[in-house]
Image (tube, grey):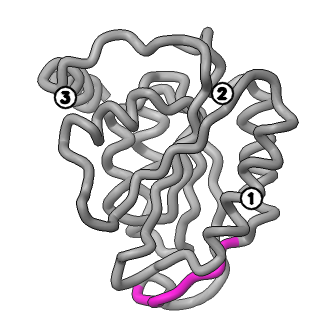
Amino acid sequence: RAALQQLRDLGLQQAGIGSRQKGTRRLLWISRSAATTRRVVNEDALMSSFRCVLNKSIGRWVIDIFSDIPPLPSAKETVRLFNSANIVVGFHGSGQANQVFCRSGTGVIDINLPEPHSQYTAHNSYALDMPYRLVMMQGVGLHQAVNITVPVGDVEDALRSLLSAGAGADDAP
């Protein structure tokens, strides 16, 4: 836990990022559209569901996308994106490692695989005091699947759950 917190602090310091400005809330989607495996084929439906749920919640929300399509964001921009997010949503993959730069209180929705090796995001979320919701995919051999269809309704439920629990609120630590 202490090592992850030190890593976060060091990354923020090196990127020159201070305290987050309050006001607009941000949901960050970690896109895998250029990945060779686990591309979310119903990403448009997922984005639409995010907008629908967030429009019904209190406050103004913006959806940011951390993309794997070149040009890739710089290290500093990556740290800024994750640190400014109130809620981060992603499918199992390397982009989720950047959640170490999120603030405590940032909500995390982890769309994950039913394979034991893929539980890193849960451990990091709990260690860094980030409310965590799991959307578990169903199937076999999904880690190497080229295309994945995400259960949009399950992700919506996880998002509503985080919002009702106060995750990502401006007064979160």
Residue 11 got which mark? 3
| 143 to the left or right of 108 | left
Q: Secondary structure at mark 3?
A: helix
Q: Which residue is mark 1?
A: 48
* Residue under the image location 32 percent in, 50 percent down: 97
Task: In the displayed orientation, state which residue is furthest to the right.
Answer: 56
N-terminal of the pair, mark 3 or mark 2, is 3
Image mark for residue 64: none
Helix, strand or loop at disc 2? loop
Q: Which residue is mark 2?
A: 167
Q: Please say whether residue 148 is one of the residues in the magenta stretch.
A: yes
The quadrant in which the N terminus is found is top left
N-term mark: 3 or 1: 3
Label 1: element kind: helix
Image coords of residue 51 (percent x, y): 74, 48
Within-10-Å neighbours for mark 1: few <14, some 14–19, many 20+: few
Q: Which residues are magenta?
A: 144-150
Q: Which residue is rendered at x = 55% and y = 12% of the image?
A: 22
- State whether residue 147 is above or below residue 114: below
Q: Does 157 sit above or below residue 127?
A: below
Asked if disc 3 and disc 1 are in contact, CB closer than 8 Å, the reply is no
State left or right for residue 107 relative to residue 67: right
Amino acid type indicated by mark 3: Gly
**Residue 73 position within the rendered picture, expressed as x and y whole percent measured from the top left:** 26, 49
117 up-or-down from 130: above or below:
below
